[in-house]
Image (cartoon, rainbow, N blue to C red):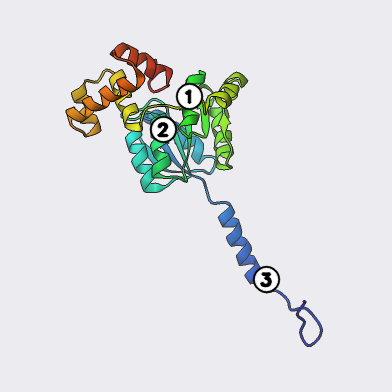
C-alpha cells in the first residue's frame, strides 16, 4: 500500500540518503581482489605484482617458499593465492593443499611450465582452481584470476581436451594413498635429502622421519630411492 501525505502526494525520497547508499554499494562492488604471491624468485614476484597492481588487484603478501605461503595465507586470509609449482620446503601443489585447510576461502592458481596430464591431475586433486602455464602468463593470468574469483576452474588453453577428459575420468579413480606428511617426506627424499636432513626440515626426530619413510615405502611397495624419485616425478611432486 502506498503512503501519501495530506495533499495526496507520495513523500519524496531523500536524495542525499540515496546518493550515499549508491556510493557505498559502488565501493563494495569495487573492492579489489586480495592476492597472495608465492615464488622463490624476486624478479618474477616483482613482475607479477606490477602486472596485478596495474589491473587494480591488491597484492597483500608475498612468500618465497611453500611453508611461508601457508603461514601468510593463514594470517591474511587472501581471496587468491598464486603459487609457483617449484618452491623450496613445500611445492606449489602441496602448499595449495595446506592453504585449503589454513584458509578455506582462499582459491589457488598454480604457475608452471608443465602441461603434462600428471601435473594437471595432481593440481586439481589438490584443490587448485587455476592452472596457468608460465609461457602464457601475460595472456592467461588475468583471465584465470577473473574466472577463479567467479567460482570457475581455469586451465591454460595449451592444456588439451585430452587432459581434460583424463581429469574427469581419473579424478576419482586414482586417489593418492599418501598422507600430506608422507608426501613431504617423499619429496624431500626425491630431492636427495638424508633422513637426518628430512628430520631437520620437518622439525621432527630422525626416528620419526625414518618411520615416515618406511611407511610410505610399504604403502607404495617401493623399496629403493631411485624408484621413489620416479614415482615423485610421475605424481608431479618434483620436477624432472
In this view of the protein, can residue 88 be seen by the observer? no
Residue 185 sits in which quadrant? top left
Task: Residue 44 in the image: state x and y as whole percent.
Answer: 42, 29
Name the disc covering residue 174, or none. Answer: 1
Question: Which quadrant does the C terminus fall into?
Answer: top left
| Disc 2 crowd, CA 10 A, few/some/many (<14, 14-19, 20+) | some
Question: Is the Cβ of the residue at disc 1 closer than 8 Å to that at disc 2?
Answer: no
Residue found at the far bottom of this picture: 6
Relative to 217, say whether 5 is above or below.
below
Question: Which quadrant does the N terminus fall into?
Answer: bottom right
In this view of the protein, can residue 160 be seen by the observer? yes
The secondary structure type at the circle numbered 2 is helix
Q: Which residue is mark 3?
A: 15
Question: In this image, 161 relative to 45: left or right?
Answer: right
- The residue shown at (77%, 77%) is 2
- The residue shown at (39%, 25%) is 86
| Disc 3 crowd, CA 10 A, few/some/many (<14, 14-19, 20+) | few
Which comes before the other along the chain, label 2 or label 3? 3
Q: Which residue is mark 2?
A: 45
Amino acid at each position: 500500500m502506498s503512503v501519501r501525505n495530506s495533499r495526496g502526494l507520495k513523500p519524496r525520497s531523500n536524495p542525499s540518503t540515496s546518493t550515499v547508499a549508491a556510493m557505498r554499494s559502488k565501493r563494495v562492488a569495487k573492492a579489489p581482489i586480495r592476492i597472495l604471491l608465492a615464488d622463490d624468485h624476486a624478479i618474477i614476484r616483482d613482475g607479477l605484482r606490477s602486472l596485478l597492481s596495474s589491473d587494480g588487484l591488491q597484492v597483500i603478501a608475498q612468500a618465497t617458499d611453500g611453508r611461508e605461503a601457508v603461514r601468510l595465507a593463514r594470517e591474511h586470509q587472501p581471496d587468491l593465492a598464486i603459487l609457483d609449482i617449484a618452491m623450496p620446503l613445500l611445492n606449489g601443489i602441496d602448499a595449495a593443499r595446506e592453504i585449503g585447510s589454513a584458509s578455506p576461502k582462499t582459491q589457488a592458481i598454480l604457475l608452471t611450465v608443465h602441461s603434462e596430464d600428471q601435473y594437471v591431475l595432481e593440481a586439481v586433486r589438490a584443490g587448485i582452481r587455476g592452472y596457468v602455464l608460465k609461457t602464457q602468463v601475460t595472456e592467461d593470468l588475468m583471465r584465470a584470476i577473473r574466472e577463479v574469483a567467479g567460482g570457475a576452474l581455469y586451465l591454460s588453453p595449451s592444456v588439451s581436451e585430452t587432459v581434460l577428459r583424463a581429469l574427469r575420468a581419473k579424478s576419482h579413480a586414482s586417489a593418492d594413498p599418501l598422507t600430506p606428511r608422507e608426501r613431504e617426506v617423499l619429496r624431500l627424499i626425491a630431492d636427495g635429502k638424508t633422513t637426518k636432513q628430512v628430520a631437520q626440515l620437518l622439525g621432527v626426530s630422525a626416528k620419526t622421519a625414518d618411520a615416515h619413510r618406511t611407511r610410505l615405502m610399504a604403502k607404495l611397495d617401493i623399496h629403493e630411492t631411485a624408484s621413489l624419485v620416479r614415482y615423485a616425478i610421475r605424481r608431479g611432486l618434483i620436477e624432472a
